[in-house]
Amino acid sequence: MDVLNVKAASRTYPIYVGEGIRRDINYLLPGSYTSVLIITDEAVSGHYLEDVKEGLDQSRVFTHVIPVGEQAKSVDIFYQLHTKAITCGLDRQSLIIALGGGVVGDAAGFAAATFMRGIDFIQMPTTILAHDSSVGGKVAINHEHGKNLIGNFYPPNAVIYDIQTLHTLNKQEIRSGYAELVKEALLSDADFFHTLMNRNLASLTNNELTEDIMRGIRIKASIVETDEYESGVRTYLNLGHTLGHALEALLGYGKWTHGELVAIGLLFAIRVSEGAYDTNLPLEKLYTWLKTNDYPLELPVIDAETIITKMKLDKKANNASIRMVLLKEVGHPCTDNIDDADLRVHLTSFLDELAKQAKNGG
């Protein structure tokens, strides 16, 4: 089992990564609790919920299952989670366990952050994508006008990551998770980026998966330790997300995965970066890798103005000006304001190129 401690400003917490550790969760708890509420979703509950329950040496263990997908990060589900906590008699010495992907982690984490003004919670990610969202303490629900607009910074008390739970992921979820790993590599590590560009997602070995996830977690943890509340370098973690989040809101949460749209957002951020800084970035290499690994790269027809309007709801927007995370080179991110006229040109050209490449078979 690998152990990494995240030394954030508000608290230090451990990340455990290993195989089968969901069955030994009792030994990894950061304290003793009067009761435990496990929150999971309909996809994960049938696979791993009983394993986690059986691994707990607690007399008061409750469970709650939410729907699958971004639709579960709603104010209705958030209220439902609070109702469950109240009816189960949870108190301030209770624990919430988020067993699932990023949606479960965000929704359960936000419930923990706000129930009785905050109780302990543990992230137990079961997707590759959640290697990113489970570390750093950003918890949130969505608003119909934008993703993660209602939330807080609330670090978990521990992250328990059982690699075995990734074996039940479908190809779409594997693609989604690796998009975030590519993002982290572009931000910090050219060698990691080149390693990922040689990965075939259809034939990943367990060692490759563990190695990639640990490298991604270390990158995320180092950024969070430097800037827990996103006042500086943590903003860089939004690379690819300004366009990706806008597309999620426009296309409907859950119809595409988060990572699939972040992948398109990464291509766009690289393209804007090349124009802004007259630099040569691995745009074609990334596009080819995405295409080879069956990422969907053909968007439905959406007007550029509609996308720009939605991008202005992004959390990084300043006085309705769009602020994007860009790259001067791999491993050297920055942020820059992009005015509407330039953005319109970049976005229109980018969408046209995606459509043309899709028509020509990539």
Image: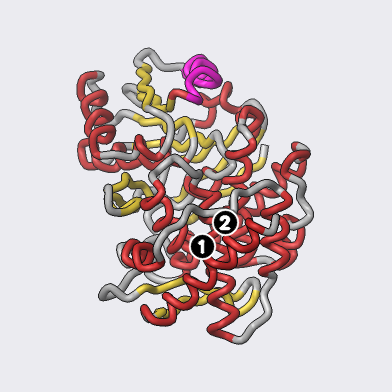
Local crowd at mark 2 within 10 Å, few (<14), some, or many (≥20)? many
Q: Is residue 23 above or below residue 126?
A: above
Under circle 1, the secondary element is loop
Residue at 43% from the left image edge and 81% from the top image edge: 342
Q: Is residue 323 visible?
A: yes
Colour mode of the rendering: secondary structure
Local crowd at mark 1 within 10 Å, few (<14), some, or many (≥20)? many
Q: Are marks 2 and 1 in contact (CB under 8 Å)?
A: yes
Q: Position of residue 222 (x, y in %)?
A: 55, 61
Q: Which residue is mark 1?
A: 240
Left or right for 236, reference 155: right
Q: Quadrant of residue 187?
A: bottom right
Q: Amino acid at mark 2?
A: Ala
Which numbered disc covers residue 263? 2
Q: Quadrant of residue 188?
A: bottom right
Quadrant of the image containing the N terminus: top right
Quadrant of the image containing the C terminus: bottom right
Q: Which residue range is magenta in the image?
A: 43-56
Q: Amino acid at mark 1?
A: Gly
Residue at 46% from the left image edge and 76% from the top image edge: 335
Under circle 2, the secondary element is helix
Distance between the alpha carbons at the discs numbered 2 and 1 = 7 Å
Residue 52 lies within the magenta run: yes
Camera-side residue: 246 or 88?
246
Tag 1 or tag 2, which sits nearer the N-term?
1
Q: Position of residue 331 (x, y in %)?
A: 63, 71
Q: Position of residue 112 (x, y in %)?
A: 31, 37
Residue at 58% from the left image edge and 39% from the top image edge: 173
Count numbered badges in the picture: 2
Q: Taken as a whole, is the magenta stretch helix, strand or loop?
A: helix
Residue 230 lies within the magenta run: no
